[in-house]
Image: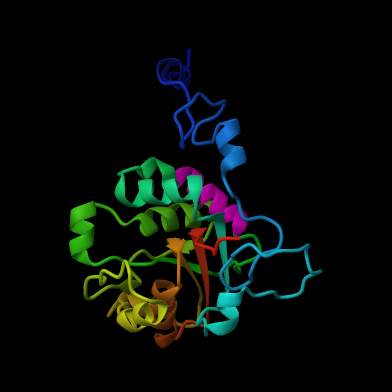
Amino acid sequence: MKLQSVIRAIYPASCVACDQPTAAENGLCGPCWRDTRFITGTACDLCGAPLMGDDAGGAVLHCDDCMTLARPWARGRAALVYDGIGRRMVLGLKHGDRTDLAVPAARWMTQAASGLFDDDALVVPVPVHWSRLLARRYNQANLLSTLVARRLGLEHLPDALVRPRPAPKMVQTGRSARFAALDRAIQPHPRRGVAMAGRCVLIVDDVMTTGATLAAAADAALRVGAQQVHVLTLARAVKDD
């Protein structure tokens, strides 16, 4: 009997969301799959938020937020809506030591990213401050970007961007205050950041809410000479219907 079969017999595959038995590793059971809001069909070309209506025949569509905010990146995609199981997965990955969730997450993200990048794209995670990394022991964006780059066969540069100061706590602040607080909060690495010059850069994070963090990361990449920036997240927060 192969080792993998022995391991499967002792530790059966289970749903990453509810721990119920599943047919395959790193997947969702039937009920959780049905309850997970995957973003498919018509979506905002800048942030990946789902949009009402059918495919517009290749037309570039933007959500309300992206029509009112200047996004420094060119295109963006997300795999899940940030609610229900999508929210639980993001929080489990970010705060619950559920690093195993990065495996299915990266698979869904690469599916969502179809057509978003070119063959020479450089994959870069949103950075965290060293104090946050020390407390959490890992950067969830780096876990995702590592697996995304591997699945897409793209170059990965985990330290192209740095965060010189800790991220401010802005749980109840407005959108404008969040953008102001994060302005220039992310910088290109003093030495390795130059690798983004002249490249298409794919910036990866776990979730997009206002987009302030991704804007700070994209601005940093553009300042060092990135040719173009795209963004990819596991989840996108959307307004209630």
Q: Residue at x 35, y 72 (%)?
A: 160
Q: How is the image coloured?
A: rainbow
Q: Nearer the viewer, residue 217 or 83?
A: 83
Q: Residue furthest front?
A: 241
Instruction: Indicate whether 95 appears above or below 53.
Output: above
| Residue 34 relative to residue 210: left or right | right
Rendered image quadrant of residue 165: bottom left
Tally of numbered tags: 0
Q: Residue at x 49, y 44 (%)?
A: 85
Measured as percent of width and height from the top left, residue 49 is found at 59, 65
Rendered image quadrant of residue 28: top right
Q: Residue furthest right?
A: 57
Quadrant housing the C terminus:
bottom right
Q: Nearer the viewer, residue 43 or 199?
A: 43
| Residue 182 relative to residue 81: left or right | left
Q: Residue at x 27, y 73 (%)?
A: 163
- Give the extent of the magenta segment: 102-112
Measured as percent of width and height from the top left, residue 48 is found at 59, 65
Is 147 in the magenta? no
Q: Residue at x 48, y 18 (%)?
A: 5
Magenta: main secondary structure: helix
| Residue 107 relative to residue 158: left or right | right
Is 104 in the magenta? yes
Rendered image quadrant of residue 81: bottom right
Measured as percent of width and height from the top left, residue 57 is found at 81, 69
Measured as percent of width and height from the top left, residue 205 is found at 43, 62
Q: Nearer the viewer, residue 53 or 154?
A: 53
